[in-house]
Image: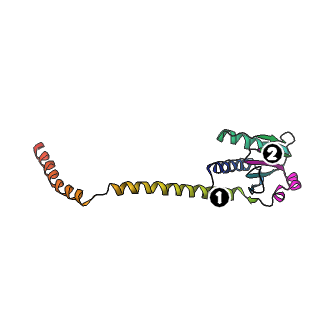
Amino acid sequence: MSITPAQDQTRILVQAAAAACESKKGEDTRILELDPVDSGLADFFLITSATNDRQAVAIADEVEGRLKKDFGVMPHSVEGRRQGDWVLLDYVDFVVHVFLTERRAFYDIERLRKSARPLTPAEFDDELKQALAAKTRAARGKSDSAPAKKTAKTASTPKTTAKKAKTEPAARKKVAAKKATKK
């Protein structure tokens, strides 16, 4: 399965959002990679827990601020910021859920999305790095073959090698003569 540039961008945004959650001490952060057949609403759910409503709002603010500052991306909609027990940031391709710990246990989104593949942020980072490295290798493989073709066209033929051999002694004599005249 190949990943499109738009999917790469989405993965990078999810990775940045997960880092923002971790920086504000979000607990048990999980990324659910949703099955495309099962879900037409988003590619990923990012779920994290907070110990109180102020922390939940702070996490949501950090995610929103970091994605706006670093990528110029704003959420399509934000829900639950006033109450703070479940803040939802909808970025269309992914949704960030910031729960109070007891609300997360009650709603249990991970159980509702059984077909989704759960990942920790570290596992998600590793997968992203591997995908980007594979793309880089593929791009370098294509660009490495182009210079090889150029060098094959400019390779010396026996005729040009013979001409070079004849002209080299004459060039050496000229250089030696110039040095002698300067002295």
Name the quadrant of the N terminus: bottom right
Q: Is residue 107 magenta?
A: yes
Q: Dot 2: within a 10 Å radius of its alpha carbon, few (fewer than 14), some, or many (20 or more) residues? A: many
Q: Quadrant of residue 83?
A: top right
On residue 115, the disc is none
Q: Position of residue 5 (x, y in %)?
A: 61, 49
- Residue depicted at 82% across the width and 45% down the height: 87
Question: Quick one: label 1 or label 2, which is nearer the N terminus?
Answer: 2
Looking at this view, is 101 or 3 the one in front? 3
Estimate the x, y position of residue 114 in percent, counting from the top left: 81, 61
Q: Which mark is residue 88?
A: 2
Which amino acid does the dot numbered 2 rest on?
A: Leu
Residue extent of the magenta highlight? 90-112
Q: Position of residue 14 (x, y in %)?
A: 70, 49
At numbered mark 1, what does the secondary structure look like: helix, strand or loop? helix
* Label 2 residue SS: strand
Relative side of 106 to 11, left or right: right
Alpha carbon separation for disc pair 1 and 2: 25 Å
Q: Which residue is mark 1?
A: 127
